[in-house]
Amino acid sequence: MLTRPFFHRLAEQGHVILDIAYSLYPQADLPTMVSEVNHAILWMKENSRTLAINPDRIVLMGGSAGAHLSLLAAYAPGQPEFQPAGENSDTTVRGVVAFYPAADLRDTFTQTQSQVSRIQRPIDKLANAMFNRIFELHPDPDSSSARAGTEYENYLVNMLGGTLEEIPQVYDLLSPITHVSKDCPPTLILQGSDDVFDLTLPVRCLHQALQEAGVPVVLVEYPHTEHGFDLILPQISPVAQAAAREVERFLAHMA
């Protein structure tokens, strides 16, 4: 949504863009979504000659939920829960670009528990309404109407199948920060300092963990900038243009 101008910009520079339409909750759970990203990586590698690309130069990129999935696929290529059905192939990538990702679901759970009392600003109310609308557009036919109309503060519990206290191992499995190691690919993280979903601090922790593991990583933090900053009038937005240039420089280093 709203990413086509940026995709065209990169394509004009010679990059091949594959826009992955992964399944959405509640039709799919998070491990299934990551496995679909890995399936797309395998497809690109298998068709690299037809696409005229180098299979060793694939870079994952995503924003928000897509950034979360990109980091999981990039950091845990051999994780059994994330493998496409019947596949046991190389899904490693050259690099990963993450716009405002959920880096630590433990922290996300904690933040969502106090989100209701803090939703006062118009932008926060808009974000909450957006989440509720998403779940209404993708209702679970096997769930009750109350669950189909999931509120933002409950979406993570419903999506993962329990609270942090009930299933901590699932929260760890689905947190990119848990999978940080020296083998992680080079990473570019783009984050707004005033993110409505309180992602800034965990992103900083992810950046520090990657540095300590010896992974090439760059965190670019934009002051007074909200979630989705690259999608609002990207052709004229200074912060969107700045982020696009950071991505271009990162991809040049990955070539």
Image: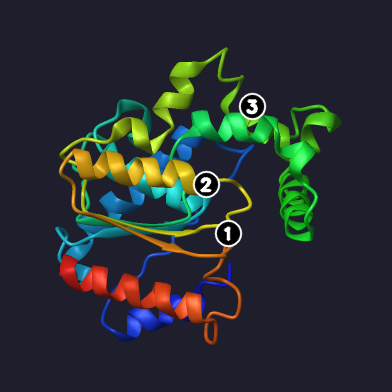
Disc 3 crowd, CA 10 A, few/some/many (<14, 14-19, 20+): some
Residue at (59%, 30%) from the top-left corner?
109
Which residue matches tag 1? 227
Residue type at the position of mark 2: Leu
Q: Name the kind of residue labelled 3 in the image.
A: Val
Residue 216 position in % (x across, y down): 19, 53
Q: Residue at x 18, y 62 (%)?
A: 57
Residue 176 at what x, y percent from top left? 37, 38
**Please, is residue 140 above or below residue 201 in the view?**
above
Mark pair 3, 1: CA separation = 22 Å
SS type, badge 1:
loop
Side of 121 where 194 appears, left or right:
left
Q: Which residue is mark 3?
A: 157
Q: Earlier in the sequence, mark 3 or mark 1?
A: 3
How much space separates mark 1 and mark 2, taking CA atoms?
9 Å
How many angstroms separate mark 3 from mark 2 (CA)? 18 Å
From the image, state whether disc 3 or disc 2 is nearer to you. Answer: 2
Given contact means CB atoms under 8 Å apart, are the residues at marks 1 and 2 in contact?
A: yes
Height in image: 82 above or below 168? below
Within-10-Å neighbours for mark 2: few <14, some 14–19, many 20+: many
User: In the image shown, does 114 or 93 lie closer to the viewer?
Assistant: 114
Q: Residue at x 52, y 15 (%)?
A: 167
Q: Which residue is mark 2?
A: 199
The residue positioned 57% from the left and 14% from the top of the image is 165
Element assignment for label 3:
helix
Q: Are marks 3 and 1 in contact (CB under 8 Å)?
A: no
